[in-house]
Amino acid sequence: MTEPLQTGAVIGILGGGQLGRMLSVAASRLGLRCHIYEPGAAPAGDVAWRVTQAGYDDAAALAAFAQSVDVVTYEFENIPTAALDLIEAIRPIRPGREALRISQDRLTEKDFLTGLGLTCAPYRAVDTLDDLRAAIAALGCPAILKTRRLGYDGKGQVRITDPAQAAEAFAAMAGAPAILEGFVTFDREVSVIAARGLDGRVAAYDPGENVHDAGILRTTTVPATLTARQRQDAVLLAGRVLNALDYVGVMGVELFVTAQGQSGGLIVNEIAPRVHNSGHWTQQGCVVDQFEQHIRAVAGWPLGDGARFADVVMENLIGDDMDRVADIARDPNAALHLYGKAEAKPGRKMGHVNRIVPRV
Ligand code: AMP
């Protein structure tokens, strides 16, 4: 299927969280419909054409879902392989399987990125306690032990500051394959949100500067503090990743910025083959935001160009940040985006706010 999707066509989205919700809103603005597949509660369901609530092991539900749509995309990367196999036999999946395979496993991902000539934190595979001891000896402390699969928002990670902590850190992985990463002393964290269309055209947004707290993104600020050279290099680097994967859709590329070294100061932390929390600022900063851009790409439409017309600070509203919503709503320069989640648990992303400073 290479023809652009027409009015009324259906995009299937695996995952019904806030990213699926905002994708669904963007699709509906283009006259397209979304069918959400989600095993649990689905904030995306409120704004979607259809919702299937079923598990990723429910072959009949997956097949019926795939039959009902024109193309399938996803809002998270940890989708079971068997479910993807089943869907792919029926409808195209965009972005493609290779991007998922690589980003599902931190070791495969780092091998891929370094294979492209990009710089990552030094790393070693860790399957046994002996591996970990050898990796600590090679990389030194501090270092971070991470599960290879299923980690997000800093989960599945242990910081090691002393080799004596090896056994305890290894036990925390609960038998899961892991990697040890050398600790990067970065000046700041930035990310590039970039997209590639079905025709191979690449469009990137201006890099945003990210501040995390306890592994969770708190704010993204554009413009990021970067040299002109770094800004250009960051965008080019993202384009290289997209082209290498023959990618279709939006990707988030997270980078550490260090004092200039051989890598020009840009070290790739990880890639996310989907719309990304650090790209939410584009909703108020760009003509075509990351959600519409992703929908355009998977629907075979031309991409927007990513130009930015405002400075923006995006702040995530997490847990009891929701208590501030009434105040934020009074601020004329604050655009509120709430996800419709019932319960504001600690650490749960409930919404975000984009505060804009128009460029004159
Ligand atoms: P991750 O889940 O791998 O993106 O890690 C979450 C956050 O932990 C990152 O955004 C960084 O703030 C921090 N972090 C992860 N890996 C490293 C590293 N190798 N060196 C320094 N900080 C790191």
Image (spheres, helix red, strand yellow):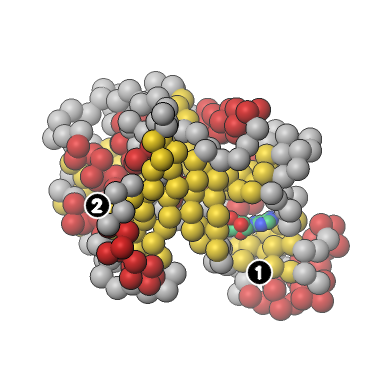
* Residue under the point 65% across and 32% down: 227
- Please provide percent x and percent y for residue 299: 28, 31
* Quadrant of residue 179 within the rendered picture: bottom right
Residue 342 is at least partly visible in this image: yes
Q: Which mark is residue 36?
A: 2
Residue 17 is at least partly visible in this image: no
* Residue under the point 38% across and 48% down: 355
Q: Quadrant of the C terminus?
A: top left
Q: Which mark is residue 355?
A: none
Disc 1: CA contacts within 10 A as few (<14), some (14-19) or many (>=20): some
Q: Is mark 2 within 8 Å of ligand 1?
A: no
Numbered disc 1: secondary structure? strand
Apparent side of residue 2 relative to residue 259 in the rendered image (left or right): left
Numbered disc 2: secondary structure? strand
For marks 1 and 2, give the CA distance: 34 Å
Q: Quadrant of the N terminus?
A: top left
Location of mark 1 (residue): 158
Q: Which amino acid is tagged 1?
A: Val
Q: Nearer the viewer, mark 1 or mark 2?
A: 1
